[in-house]
Amino acid sequence: MASYKLSALVALIWLLPVYSVVPEESSRSHPDPVKIAEVTVRISDHGPVVLLQAEGRTIQIFVDLTVALSIQSALNGEKLPRPMSHDLMHTILNAYGGKVTQTVITLKGGTYYGALTVAFKDQVKVFDSRSSDSIALAVHFKAPILVARDLLESAGKIPEKEKGAEL
């Protein structure tokens, strides 16, 4: 009975709407993706923040505490006493031979979006998601996180220690 319910859940998830890799306005204008070299999680004055770092720049994406904990535990290779949502999805996908192959983070109207690519047997599908969930699942699967070069250049900040000394 439990196996039937799990199979039904996976089938339902697999039938959810699928979207293009990036929102329409981004798909034509970002042919030069940049692979994020490092992901870190920090606590700021405004709450938990995921830092996506590449080419000397950092994109800050504010997330909720549970997503921050999920990403941090995956980065550290830790297993929490009870599985969180991203752990559960990772386990379900693994059990059925699926895996996250990449995520593409875009910015539209001041909101970050994730396009999560999942491979399952002979199918590859891209799912629209919150950027934080997309990043969490990519980290769990050790999959590449990509951003457009112009997003990195426009939203990415140069860390303070790399900036010239300010008077």
Image (cartoon, grey):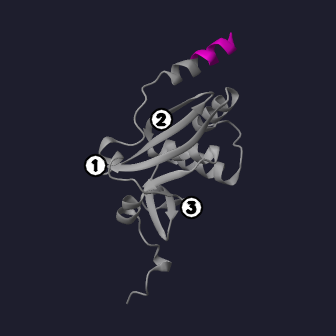
Amino acid identity at mark 1: Gly
Mark 1 neighbour class, 10 Å CA radius: few under 14, some 14 to 19, many 20 or more = few
Q: Which mark is residue 158?
A: none
SS of the residue at dot 2?
Answer: strand
Residue named by callout 1:
109
**Horizontal and vertical percent position of residue 57:** 46, 68
**Horizontal and vertical percent position of residue 15:** 48, 21
Q: In the image shown, does 85 or 118 lie closer to the viewer?
A: 118
**Between disc 3 and disc 2, whose residue precedes?**
3
Residue named by callout 3:
37
Q: In the image shown, does 165 or 29 lie closer to the viewer?
A: 29
The answer for how far apart the CA atoms under marks 1 and 2 are is 21 Å
Q: Which mark is residue 126?
A: 2
Q: Which residues are magenta?
A: 1-8
SS of the residue at dot 3?
Answer: loop
Report if residue 2 lies within the magenta region: yes
Please, is residue 57 above or below residue 1 in the view?
below
Instruction: From the image, give the main secondary structure of the stretch colored magenta.
Output: helix
Q: In the image shown, does 22 or 129 lie closer to the viewer?
A: 22
Report if residue 156 lies within the magenta region: no
What residue occupies the far top of the structure in this picture?
A: 1
Amino acid identity at mark 2: Val
Q: Quadrant of residue 153?
A: bottom left
**Between disc 3 and disc 1, whose residue precedes?**
3
